[in-house]
Image (tube, rainbow, N blue to C red):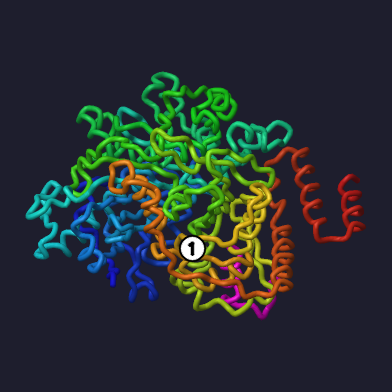
Amino acid sequence: SGKEQQIPYPVPMSFFFHSNSKSSSKKKDKKSSSKQTTTSSSSSSSSRSSSTTTRRGGIMSTEQQSFNPPTTAKDHHEKIKTYWDDDIWKTDGKRPLVVALDQGTSSTRVCLVTQTGRLLAWAQMEHEQIYPRQGWHEHDPIVLIQNSLACVQAVQQVLTTHTQGSGGTSSTSTSSGGTSSGGTSINAKIAAIGITNQRETTLAWNRKTGMPYYNAIVWDDARTAHIAMEIGKDGDKDCLRAATGLPLSSYFAGTKVRWLLDHVQQLRTDLQNDPDQVCFGTIDTWLVYQLTGQVPSPSVAAASPHHPPHLRCRGQFVTDVTNASRWLFLDLQTQKWDPQLVDRVCAPHKVPLTALPTVVASSRIYGKCTVPMELIHNVPIAAVLGDQQAALFGQTAFSAGQAKNTYGTGLFLMMNTGPTAIPSTHGLLTTIAYQMEGQPVQYALEGSVAHAGSTIQWLRDKLQIIDSAPDTEDLATETNEGLYFVPAFGGLFCPHWRADARACLVGLTASHHKGHVCRAALEAAAYQTVEVLQAMQADSGITLSSLKVDGGASANRLLMQFQADMLAVPVIQPVVMETTSLGAAFAAGLAVGVWESMDELASLWAVQHTFEPQLKNETRQKYMAEWKKAVSKSLGWVLEDMPKEKKKTIELRNILDVSTWTQGTALTVAIGSLLV
């Protein structure tokens, strides 16, 4: 019964930010001229391609050697996708509402969640993906907060529009960007704000001005692979695992902090001269800081070139335990920053603990929002969770042994292990699931895969063989006909942890077409899930009888059926698929009393559809054997910058990996050849 639409941005972006440069007009290609789009970087396929090769706004191009802070974002005239459900408003409109701010890798979404655990309204917009060099991936942090506020304003407008004259909420926009109320205030209905975020994506900013020193380095950015190798003595990628639960990888925030210190001169200068003014944080910390901060004085803003007039400073500098557990800095047992870990990862730089956010529980009151927008002003921010932990919470997986799999930009399978941290010996991550204020930390095992939904985006934006993600289900062939797609664009994460891997299409013949490529891209997510689940069952000793799923790609019925076939267990879709937003709202509502207990939350979860396995076992085994063979072909591609000794080690590892499907005689000959 809900209505989904796209609307122009409801108020000028100059309310939030200004730009010194005029936005250039965007050309429309033939395909996009007849369709609306939510891609904020561009409307056309040609401009999408160009916008991801160089940094716009005068920050950095692939040729520049110096690294400068982000500039103000351009005014936005793109359309924001919005949703409203009249039926839910009629039944739940008089009850408290919780705002969920979900800042993800490809887009930002703001949702209104009702007391019955349903989505009343949401607004969503994509942001530009910046790829300055091969293997690098960045976001403009100013755009992230700008888009967050744009979505808040869009939800506010949708709520106002649909409730005026219905005896419900009403308000009108004012020239200052706020609202004046008519009837019941919008703000009075909002009980709390919950925040969930893309994890590990890291930035640094100045506490006095609120200005970032550099773009946010995204979680799947591979530029710090050499840093991870340097930290591990003699190639031991597990040397910090006992303390942190994590292997050494470019994936985690700590290596990104080290890179920023290595390459951003102003950051190093400020850290040496006035360390109390430097803040390092992941996106959750950045959002809370901005939403609870103050507008800097005119003199401070004037001293910072291109300072957006509404960029805030001196907000709450905090992070929750789930995000903190992804840095390589946190002791999992004490849930505190470990100075020895910080020194080990950041050497030779010295990073004081004052430059790191205070670590707190996931569900608690962080502070009240100071942004003068009717929907959120003075509303308590009452929860922060990393996106995958939020999805686990939204799936109400509150007991040890319960698990979920999220098909988003990446792919993330997480199992609640209760108050016990289980070390992994099969390439998984031991991480924190959540913590309620005043209660013990709950732990989890997680398998993280870098590319799932982003593989489909690649088909859309780079190969341009689809117009939108749902096209893959229509185009995909009935079988892959021997074609396998290993999406190791920046290496392989769990359970392989191979930074030297790169993406490949294997088994390609002249008879294959784009339908086969779409099929192979979808199947890749299912195969990787099987690998992670097998590792998780080996570590935990628990065999899952079913798998709860969520995330954008979980709406693809072809993928979900194939996933059930490859796992040989039922795959369960919940009624509310946006479990990441739901989890953030649930945790925030618990902190302020919208819900009384986790049992009450569990009662709100319901099944929408169950996919039962249909594939024969021998066919399943054949597919997995061919997938593993394809994975072996992706290994060992990035060796140029490695010392000779490390190259030989990786080459030998590649041969050993291949030995899982080759004859022992061939292995002996290959090793002999390598030694010669």
The image quadrant where one finds the N terminus is bottom left
Reply yes or no: does residue 520 show up in magenta: yes
Residue 72 as seen in the image, left or right of residue 640? left
Left or right? Give the position of 297 relative to 458: left
Question: In this figure, what is the number of numbered marks?
Answer: 1
Q: Is residue 29 above or below residue 435?
A: below
For the residue pair 538 and 643, the one nearer the viewer reads as 538
Reply above or below: 227 against 175.
above
- Residue 583 spot, x, y in % from top left: 39, 51
Asked if one can make out residue 499 in the rendered structure from this viewpoint, the answer is no
The quarter holding residue 354 reads top left
Residue 508 visible here: yes
Most common SS among magenta residues: helix
| Residue type highlighted by circle 1 | Gln
Q: What element carries label 1?
A: helix
Locate residue 599, reporting x and y percent: 40, 50
Locate residue 434 relative to residue 95 in the image: left or right.
right
**Residue stretch rendered in magenta on the structure:** 507-525
Q: Where is residue 382 in the image (x, y as percent from the top left)?
A: 32, 41
* Figure check: 339 above or below 85: above
Residue linked to disc 1: 457
Residue lying at 23% horizontally and 60% vertically, measured from the top left: 92
Front residue of 28 and 646: 646
| Image coordinates for residue 96, horizontal then vertical, percent | 23, 52
Q: Which residue lies furthest to the top in this view?
A: 273
- Is 461 placed above or below 288 here? below
Q: Which is more toward the observer, 573 or 672?
A: 573
Q: Does the stretch in magenta take in 99?
A: no
